Every structure is written in structure tokens, then in C-alpha cells.
Amino acid sequence: MRNRPLCFVLFSLMCAAAVRAQDTVRSTSADGDQLPEAAPVVVSATRFDIPLDQSPASMSVIDSQDIENKQIERAADALREVPGLAVVQTGTPGQLTSVFMRGLPSQDMQVLLDGIPINQGLAGQFDFANLTTDNFERIEVARGPQSTIYGPRALAGVVQVFTKQGSGPPGITVSSEGGTYGTFRETLASDGKIDIFDYSIGASRLDTDNARPNNQYRNSDVIADLGLTPVEHLRLGSLFLYSLSDTGNPNSVFNPKPFDNFLTERWLVGPHLDWRPTDWWEQRIIFDYDQERQVNDPNQDGFVGPTRALFRQTQLDYQNNIRPMSWLTLTNGFFFSHVLAGQERPFVLFGPKFISDETKEIAGFLQATLNIDNFVFVAGGRIDHFDQFGDVWTYRFASSYKIDKTDTTLHASVATGFSPPSSQDKIFRFNPNPSQPLPSLEPEKDFGWDVGFEQRLWDRRVSVGATYFHNDLSNVIGFNGQFLTLNLGAAETQGIETELRATPIANLDLRASYTYLEAEKTDSANITQLQGARLPRRPRNEVYVSGSYLWCKKFRTTVEAKFVNAREEINFGGPNFDVEDYSFLNVAAEYEINPHMSIFGRVDNLTGEHYSEVHELVFTGSKTVVSPFPNLGTAAYAGMKLRF
């Protein structure tokens, strides 16, 4: 597909049978049935409210109703339906879970929680293993470089989670469930508003043994949002998050670790102020402190032994929106970040027993958004200054045009993005000549563009469309022939992401998505892979379909399936090796006994598919074998939910 004329790209878009992601707000008919209505507003495309059908970015929205219908407990499983995303889980629930956006590495995607960047750990990526859907209002996914408004690690795009904000009389929902593999899960949710005080809280506890020895998983989560509104248009709020995860690490099938254990504890507090003194001026300021500790014991890698890592992040984000004219919004602000990362290795035989990294960043950005007669145009720039390697400039131009007569939206964007070297990249660098310092690592960079459309039909009961995207990744951190870690890599990704959403009759919700991806390594300096090799763990084809129907306004059934093929795993220094295709089928049902009680159940991987999303090469002495990290087989769960 490289270097094809733009006219052919546009022709391919018009011929594609699918759609850019969209969510719909639903109204209720006279008989109580749900019907599609207007598109909701989204924030992630511009950092302020804009109707989804006018979004200049390629957007997807997953709302809390979709999460509840499918009984999704972890954010990673919700993201499996989003086109352009590849979710890769290293075995069973609780193991490392990465998300690749448009074929770019997982550390090049920024994850936000109510506007707070939450990428963590030494690697700078977000591990979705322990992020539950407790207290989620919606998930927004903005694809394409977003560094101009979200800074570091928004090279591929952003995934932003919004928590619920309490309104109305306080209420409580509790649930309990059990099932296969010794699984038990309990949840509590409550939200409401009392005078000037509003709150929402979600908490859960999961205990499961999974399928293999040393595969147990214990996870506790709490997410809360508290707020005060002393006067109209002013809210003082704070986000609280706590997570404690303890998991056994069985490793791959042919290289098991029967005693390895990994504990992760994380807590975050993020007070924020939202103030709108006039109709044309609004401000937001967020301060957050985020801490994560990890204990790997006994860490059976044969080299380092038990480790303890600590990651601390302090951030300040200020945003100012001014609307001097009805058709113009000026968005500007600044961002400050201070990161401390370290790892203690008391039993290491060679090298330091404690390694650490400290990074400071300050940034400023400016964006202008014009909205004239359904034409939206966004232009912005940003400068980030890092104490370790200096300045990084990024820019973004994006636009959309909505044709009211046909209810069609056309959109396009071109932007640059960057991802700074992680603490892991810096502190684990091999230096064959310690007397001569290595050159500083520079940020990885991307030039990306996309173009697409969305077509709504049949009074918005059906939405179809497609987006073509292209990314040129440069300055990638990798190894040269002497195993030095340097900026020397390059890669190219391109493809089509499509989706369909339909409500042909009341209470029936149908969804489908398809992603085609080409992801190729384009340099020869990085010895980990050959030039022209396909980037590992990026499927060429992904298909997702789901259907949900509410019977007699009491009984909801949901079916979802996914097919993934044409994947490769990395073979350091040699050709990558192919891994098998896989598919899974999940079903779920819930029956409302009365407004205060319901029973529910689900079966995951109904067909009993034996598959692995991650593999590794293991050298057994006489031969090299492909060793999988197997996912769970068929699993069934059932429980009860009470509402007060």
C-alpha cells in the first residue's frame, strides 16, 4: 500500500463496508423503548466539549451501558471492540496486558483518567491488567498523534476514561458472583448528590486461581470522585484511586516458573478545579500525585533475583478555553511533570544494587478551533522541555465537515507526536566502555495522517464509515551491532479501521468492526529484527461483532465474538515466526426480577478455543520451540445484583 495515490485511498474509503466509531445518546419512546437520537459530546478530540458527529479526530466511545450489557469487568476487554486497537494479554487475567494503537508500541499511547495521564512503571506504558471498569461513565479513544494537546506518549493517540459524577438521590448497587477456576468477585457502587456535595464510588474484589499452577490472581480496586459546587459554574473535586494486585507468574508453557510472584500497589489522588466565570471563558486546573510500587519475588530469571520498584509522579495541568467569537475557541495551557523511578536489586551479582531515574518536564500549548456552518478546523502547536534532552516541538491540523442533507461527516488530520525514552530505556542501557558516557537518548517521533468518513442512515439507526491512516515512526530506540541502546530505528504502519453500529429495532444493538494493518520495520540498524520484518504482535486482520437485545424489558442477552489472524512473534536477530490465528465467543445474560434485584451470568470462550496472544522462543538445548502463554479455556460465571 506504500506510495499509492491519494485518489486510490479515497476510493478505498468509499468502498469500505464499515465505520468510524460512534456512540449515540438514546431517547425513550412512548412505550418505553429506547431509540437512537443525537450524537453525544466528546472531550478527547479537542480538550473541550464537541459533538461526536463533528469530531475532527478519529474517535470511538464506549459507554457504561455497553460495559454493563456485556458484563465487562476490565477496561482491556472493553477496548477489544474498538477498531485500530490490538489488545495483547500475556496469558490469563492479571498478567501483563498491552494495547497497540494503529500498530505503534504500547508505550506510545497515552492513557488518561479524568484528564490525568496515568502511564506508569519503568517502561512508561500502561498495564491494563488491573484497570477495572468500576465507576466508569465512558471510555473515549482518540486515534492519531495527539501530543499537541496531551504531550508525551500520545504519539499513537489517547485512551481516556471518564468516571461517573454523582447526581440525583444517593443510591447503592452491590453484586456478588462466582464461577470457574475458583473465581469469586464482589462489587459495590454508589453515587448521588446532596445539596452542594456530589460523589461517586466504585469498588471491587476479585479472587481467582485461573488454570495453571502458580496462576492465582487477587485484585482489589477503588475509584472515587468527590465534588463540591459552592456556586454555579464552580466545582472543586478530587479523584481517588487505589489498586492492590497480587498474582502468580507461571510464565510460558515450556519455560514455567512455579514460584514467581508479582505484587503491584498503586494509589493516586487528583484534586481539580473547574470554573466557568462567563459563557465565553472556562478554566481547569488539575494537580495529581501518583505512586506505584512493584515487588517481584523470587524473580526466577536466573540473573537479578528479587526486585522492588517504586515509581512516583507529580503533575500539574492547567487549561484555559476562551471563546471571543461564537465560531472560535482558543485553548491554551501549561503542563508540569516530575517523575522519580527506581529499582532495588539486593541480590544482583554484577552492577549496582539500586538504579534510578529522575525526569522533569514543562510544556505549553496553544490550539485554535474554528466551527463555521458545520465546518470544524483545528490548528495547534506545543513545546515540551525536558531537563535531560531539551525541547520537543509538535503540531496538529485536523478538520471535519458535516453534510446535514445526507448526515455525513468527513474528517482528516495530520500531526506529529513523540514518546520520550522511558526510565527502563535509560537505566538499563549497556555501556561497553564505562569511561566514555553514552549519548543521551532522544524521544521517538511520529508523523501521522488519516482521512475518513462517517455515514448515518435510517434516522441514525445505522452508522457506517471508515478511516485510512498512515504513520512514519522515527528515532526508535533499539540495539546496534554492538548491543548499544541508541536512537536508530524506523517503522511504518498504515491500514484501514472500520466499524458498524446499528439499532434496526428498539432494544436491539448491533456492532461490528474490522481493522486491516500493515506494520513494517523500515531500518537496518536495529539488530533485533531484520529490515522489512512485520512488527510483532500486530495482527494484520481483526474482526469483532456483537449483538445485544432486551426481551420484554426484563431479560437482556448479549453475544460477542472476535477473530484475529496474521500475527508474528519476534525472533531476535532472525526472521519473525508466525503464530496461529485465534477467535473467541462470549455470551452473557441478565434478568431483572424487580427494580431492586437482578440475576446474571456469562460464558467466556464458549467454544473452548485453545489460544495464546503472546508467545516466546525457548532454547531447550537440542532445539528451539515456540512456547505459548495460554489464555483461559471455557469459563462460566453467575451472580446476583441488588440496588437500593
Image (tube, helix red, strand yellow):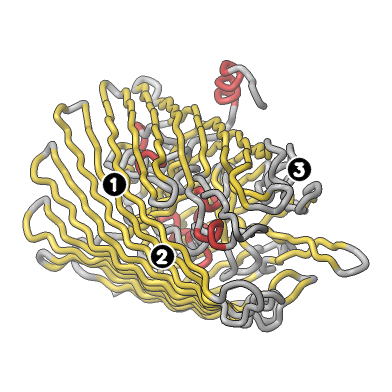
Is residue 238 rendered to the left or right of residue 497? Answer: left
Image coords of residue 595 (percent x, y): 33, 69
Q: Which residue is mark 3?
A: 530
Q: Residues within 10 Å of mark 1 (few under 14, many from 20)?
A: few
Q: Secondary structure at mark 3?
A: loop
Q: Say what amino acid the circle numbered 1 marks.
A: Ala
In the depicted structure, whether residue 231 falls above or below residue 82: below
Badge number at residue 299: none
Q: Say what amino acid the circle numbered 3 marks.
A: Leu
Image coords of residue 61 (percent x, y): 42, 46
User: Quadrant where the C terminus lies?
Assistant: bottom left
Q: Real-space Cα distance between discs 1 and 2?
A: 57 Å
Q: Real-space Cα distance between discs 1 and 3?
A: 63 Å
Who is closer to the viewer here, 591 or 516? 516
Image coords of residue 87 (percent x, y): 58, 54
Nearer to us: label 3 or label 2: 2
Q: Residues within 10 Å of mark 2 (few under 14, many from 20)?
A: some
Residue 257 falls in which quadrant of the image? bottom right
In the depicted structure, whether residue 235 falls above or below residue 378: below
Q: Real-space Cα distance between discs 3 and 2?
A: 35 Å
Who is closer to the viewer here, 610 or 627? 627
Which residue sits at x=68%, y=39%? 521
